[in-house]
């Protein structure tokens, strides 16, 4: 089936996707925080901080205002049908980004790294960030994450073996890197975080895989049983670190751990760790000729 | 919950202890990377009266303008540690009594808090809509053109702005305490 792109409708749909992502936390994230709140000790700072976070999420959704003022790097993972002009899709996403920034749903967040000037509308070199793939469906899918600077700054990349961590070139070594990264992050990435991990690849691919994991639902199960076991183990152990919400101490340090992998060179073994804050803003849109579905 | 009116005296700030929950009312000023570099490198006079006795808030807000008036739409704290090279000197030079941010700060700032009589107040990171609602009026903005919206210094009137004292003026830091314990556990998990 041939897919015809109605650019105006597509632009409006992308505007709504960005608005939704900035102002409305996904239901599975809210549910995980509610459970965490119930699990923390009554009257503890951890419990009260989770309460403030949940109250903030409710207010942001009701008023259609940003959950967090750092509306982050806008990461678009776009999947298109055969024959669609990537240039047109890119231009439409850029236009939608400008519109949403004007409406104070996004903060002007793109700074020229050479001159130091803020572009004022979130557009610039590689901003917003758009990653393209193709599929066989007559629709465009956009997975959008807004990832703030605080959480990006504590994201990390390790090269195995690592003598400081006594970590070898195997899954046990990966485990140690993740424990170290989350411990180093403390509350700085706005804990409780969601941890996306990319094993292998080169440095760039490893991070793309790590960030892609952030689109998985918190309660899903990794299809690779070995990785599924590692996700479970890391989730349990990271929550023993006692860092807690915002680093004030407590039982909830992470809300989820998700692992993906890519083939690597025999000589390289990278572990890429993408830390996402509790304000885990991600939504998906599937845009076809007859309907637009948001999740 | 301790209620505190801004500006505040050194004596009142010295009474605060690590772990106290505080609610702030009065005038405060935002400032982050560009502002801190500016304050130290150019030592501007025009903000001296404004900063004396109040707190500086590490925040780059989302704002909108309605009928010629600025409105704070979203305004949570940003990571404070980036200002570590400047913070101690900024506190002393401008007579500030506190810093609001997230993630805590380092040894140099902790020493300055003790020496000068100031506290580090932690706001809930990401709680941007809720914190913006505590801003009742935007009085002024400094360096908007040059620094851009997130980096400009916004002069705010706040009411019941909620924070927790995580570094007090007696040398105590909750961040150090939590880090020591989590380091121990991390080493145990990693077997090192």
Image (spheres, coloured by chain):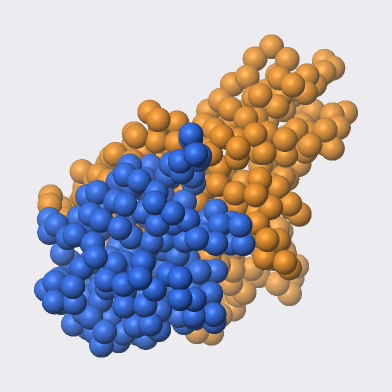
Chain colours: A orange, B blue
**Residue B170 relative to residue B157: left or right:** left
* Residue A170 spot, x, y in % from top left: 57, 69
Relative depth, front residue between A227 and A100: A100
Q: Is residue B72 visible?
A: yes
Q: Residue at x 35, y 70 (%)?
A: B49
Figure check: A53 above or below B122: above
Which residue is at the far top? A290
Q: Residue at x 66, y 24 (%)?
A: A12
Q: Is residue A276 visible?
A: no
Res A238 quadrant in image: bottom left
Relative depth, front residue between B110 and B96: B96
Figure check: A40 above or below A21: below
**Residue A193 relative to residue A284: left or right:** left
Q: Residue at x 26, y 52 (%)?
A: B161
* Residue A63 spot, x, y in % from top left: 40, 30
Figure check: A66 above or below A255: above
The N terminus of chain A: image quadrant: top right
**Residue A123 relative to residue B164: left or right:** right
Q: Residue at x 31, y 52 (%)?
A: B157
Res A264 quadrant in image: bottom right
Report how many numbered discs are placed on residues in the image: 0
* Residue A293 spot, x, y in % from top left: 59, 21
* Residue B120 spot, x, y in % from top left: 29, 71
Res A121 quadrant in image: top right
């Amino acid at each position: 089936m041939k897919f015809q792109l109605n650019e105006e409708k597509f632009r409006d749909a992308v505007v709504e996707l960005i608005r939704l992502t900035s102002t409305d936390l996904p239901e599975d994230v809210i549910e995980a925080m509610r459970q965490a709140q119930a699990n923390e000790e009554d009257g503890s700072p951890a419990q009260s901080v989770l309460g403030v976070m949940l109250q903030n999420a409710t207010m942001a959704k009701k008023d259609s205002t940003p959950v967090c003022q750092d509306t982050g790097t806008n990461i678009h993972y776009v999947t298109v049908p055969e024959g669609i002009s990537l240039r047109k899709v890119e231009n439409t996403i850029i236009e939608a980004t400008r519109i949403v920034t004007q409406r104070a749903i996004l903060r002007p967040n793109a700074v020229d790294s050479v001159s130091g000037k803020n572009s004022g509308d979130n557009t610039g070199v590689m901003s917003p960030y758009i990653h393209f793939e193709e599929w066989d469906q007559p629709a465009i899918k956009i997975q959008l994450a807004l990832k703030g600077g605080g959480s990006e700054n504590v994201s990390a990349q390790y090269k195995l073996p690592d003598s400081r961590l006594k970590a070898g070139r195997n899954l046990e070594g990966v485990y140690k890197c993740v424990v170290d990264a989350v411990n180093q992050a403390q509350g700085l990435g706005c804990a409780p975080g969601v941890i996306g991990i990319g094993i292998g690849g080169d440095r760039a691919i490893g991070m793309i895989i790590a960030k892609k994991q952030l689109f998985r639902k918190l309660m899903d199960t990794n299809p690779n049983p070995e990785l599924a076991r590692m996700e479970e183990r890391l989730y349990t152990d990271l929550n023993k670190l006692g860092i807690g919400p915002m680093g004030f101490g407590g039982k909830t340090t992470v809300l989820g751990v998700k692992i993906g992998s890519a083939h690597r060179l025999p000589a390289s073994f990278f572990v890429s760790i993408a830390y996402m804050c509790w304000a885990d803003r991600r939504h998906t849109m599937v845009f076809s000729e007859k309907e637009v579905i948001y999740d | 919950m301790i209620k505190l009116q801004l500006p505040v005296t050194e004596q009142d700030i010295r009474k605060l202890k690590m772990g106290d929950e505080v609610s702030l009312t009065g005038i405060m000023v935002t400032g982050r990377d560009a502002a801190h570099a500016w304050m130290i490198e150019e030592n501007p006079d025009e903000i001296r009266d404004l900063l004396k006795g109040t707190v500086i808030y590490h925040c780059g807000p989302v704002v909108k303008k309605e009928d010629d008036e600025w409105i704070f739409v979203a305004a949570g704290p940003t990571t404070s540690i980036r200002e570590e090279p400047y913070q101690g000197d900024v506190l002393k030079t401008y007579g500030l009594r506190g810093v609001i941010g997230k993630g805590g700060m380092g040894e140099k700032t902790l020493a300055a808090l003790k020496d000068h009589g100031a506290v580090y107040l932690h706001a809930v990171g990401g709680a941007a809509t809720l914190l913006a609602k505590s801003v009742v009026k935007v009085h002024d903005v400094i360096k908007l053109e040059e620094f851009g919206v997130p980096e400009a210094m916004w002069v705010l009137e706040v009411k019941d702005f909620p924070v927790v004292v995580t570094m007090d003026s007696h040398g105590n830091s909750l961040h150090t305490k939590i880090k020591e314990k989590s380091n121990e556990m991390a080493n145990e998990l990693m077997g090192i």
